[in-house]
Image (cartoon, rainbow, N blue to C red):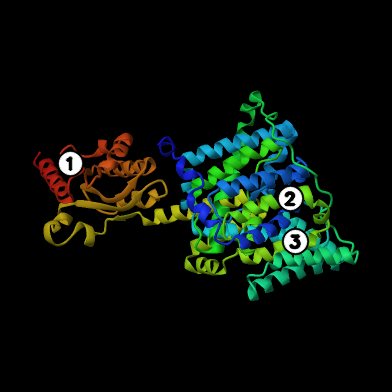
Amino acid sequence: MLADRFALGSLFPSRGDLTAIRTAPRADLIAGLTVAVVALPLALGFGAAAGMGPAAGLTTAIVAGLVAALFGGSNLQVSGPAGAMTVVLIPIIKEHGQQGVMLVGAMAGVILVLLALCRAGAFIRYIPAPVIEGFTLGTAIVIFLQQLPVAVGMDPDSHHVAVAAFEAVLAFITHPQWINLGLAFGVAGVILLGIRWWPKIPFSLLAVAAAALATYAFGVPVADIGDLPSTLHAPSLSFIDVGAIPGLLGPALAVAALAAIAGLLCASVADSMHGGEKHEPNRELFGQGLANLASPLFGGMPASAVVARTAVNVRAGAQSRMAAAWHAVILAAFLLFAASLVEHIPLAALAGVLLATTVGMVNRGNLSALARSTRSDAIVLAFTTIATVTLDLVMGVAVGLAAAGLVTLVKVAASLRLHVDHTKVLGRSGADANLVSEHIGVYRLHGPLVFAAGPASLLAGAQRADVRAAVLHLEDVTTVDATGALVLRDFAEQLAKRDVRIFMSGLREEHRDTLVAVGVLEHIDAGNLPDGPVEAAIEAARRRLRSIEAS
């Protein structure tokens, strides 16, 4: 009962998870092995790039990968050290050292668990489809560009993926490394053809193994994974420094935000790639939180979901969360028992696996539909993709959301209409037949009266008719904010300066407080009920004009 009260029950593994992992054990094992082979050099590299060392990266892939697989909300997602995370961690390690990075990871884990308990995962529902598809396309391009230098056997100086890829291509033109290029694109070609014609065969694993055997047997000089650490750290709480917590709260929030965004969007990408899957966003936040709490205990770094490894997992035929769990277990086995064999896998062959993965990440049908649906969707899609490639994954989402918000605001502004046309509003038939001769104007507002709505068209309406009494009819106003209310007040003041008596009708109760707060109702004639029907407001205007004429 206590678990239900605090929403804990739905965040832990269920009986349905146990049933799911029994459906295709062989496919999950093969997918886990394939992902482990790909994740191994990436984990080592990201650990070194963050300043924590290769061992910390591998530890993170094992510990965080296993915890997130068991407790996360996606059946297909793979977590571990990520390239985007290293950007956040490098300044922390320079100022606070490795202990500070581990403490930040634990603090971020606590924040993520709290977000899960607060049901914050629901915000993923409000991310528009063009942003998700643009993020996916941008991430695929980033992965392709990241692997291009390895594929051509070059080591560029720049850390920006697009610049590094360009430098690598130029260097290859000058000094071509055909062996690396052949390995990378040969492995990629075998995988893509194999998936098309024999999808049940694990071509990713077979192609990497064949490349490793061929290069080792014939002594081909190519870069390989190299030396591996030999063991995991024992669990320890020595990194906890209570006095440092206040100073690390900002970085911890940044790490938590990155892990949350990456986790939820990566889960959406996995759902899209597999078809028929649907992740649980709050449980995903919970799993990422526990993963980041567990990783520092063994000397690891903060972790997040990783699109590249998740995409490999899906393409390799994963059917349940057991594939991601196997990935972590197999990495641990590599570390303890098979380090000498794994060390000889060519990096170019692993680059080929990721190059092939980028092809399967993109849903060309969705992209085509969004590009052709509306111009605004195409713009948001393009902005998100470009920002993801040129900036980083988090900024790509931020720019996409900003573009989507701006497009929405433009649409909101366009939806506010003011009707003051004489033939339609002032009327020439029925009860309103004499409004023109009586100089009574009815101003009917339709749509949202918010800050995005342009005030110019509204204020211009005050000058459109020769009226002595104006009825502001608000029944069709859907929402009002403070800025919109101020615009309406300015509208009323413009009429008042021309000695026009102002009446109101159709005011909704939920909008009254806002209009009162900014002083709109101060300009309304005392003989008028603002929430009454438009006919009553017109009749009140007639009475007021007659009384003025009589006096």
Q: Mark 2 points at which residue?
A: 333
- Please name whichever residue, 52 or 124, is drawn nearer the observer in this view of the structure: 52
Helix or strand or loop: what does disc 2 sit on? helix
Indicate the position of residue 420 as horizontal and vertical percent values. Answer: 27, 56
Residue 98 lies in quadrant: top right
- State the quadrant of the N terminus: top left
SS label for mark 3: helix
Q: Nearer the viewer, residue 178 or 399?
A: 178
Q: Which of 97 and 342 is in front in this view?
A: 342
Query: Mark 2, mark 1: which one is toward the viewer?
Result: 2
**Mark 1: amino acid:** Leu
Identify the image quadrant of residue 106: top right
Q: Distance between the residues labelled 2 and 3?
A: 22 Å
- The answer for how far apart the CA atoms under marks 2 and 1 are is 78 Å
- Where does residue 284 sit, x and y in percent of width and height? 54, 47
Q: Nearer the viewer, mark 3 or mark 1?
A: 3
Under mark 2, the amino acid is Ala
- Kindly tell me whether residue 85 is visible in this rendering: yes
Residue extending furthest toward the left: 550
Residue 214, position as x, y percentages in the image: 84, 67
The residue pinned by badge 3 equals: 351
Which residue corresponds to the image point at 59% horizontal and 38% vertical from the top-left? Answer: 109
Distance, label 3 to label 1, CA atoms, is: 73 Å
Q: Mark 2 and 1 residues: CB-CB less than 8 Å, in contact?
A: no
Of label 3 and label 1, which has the lower sequence position? 3
| Residue 379 relative to residue 166: left or right | left
Which residue is at 42% across, 49% downward? 452
In the displayed structure, does residue 242 sit left or right of residue 43? Answer: left
Q: Residues within 10 Å of mark 1 (few under 14, many from 20)?
A: some
Q: Mark 1 points at which residue?
A: 529
Where does residue 252 sit, x and y in percent of width and height? 61, 36
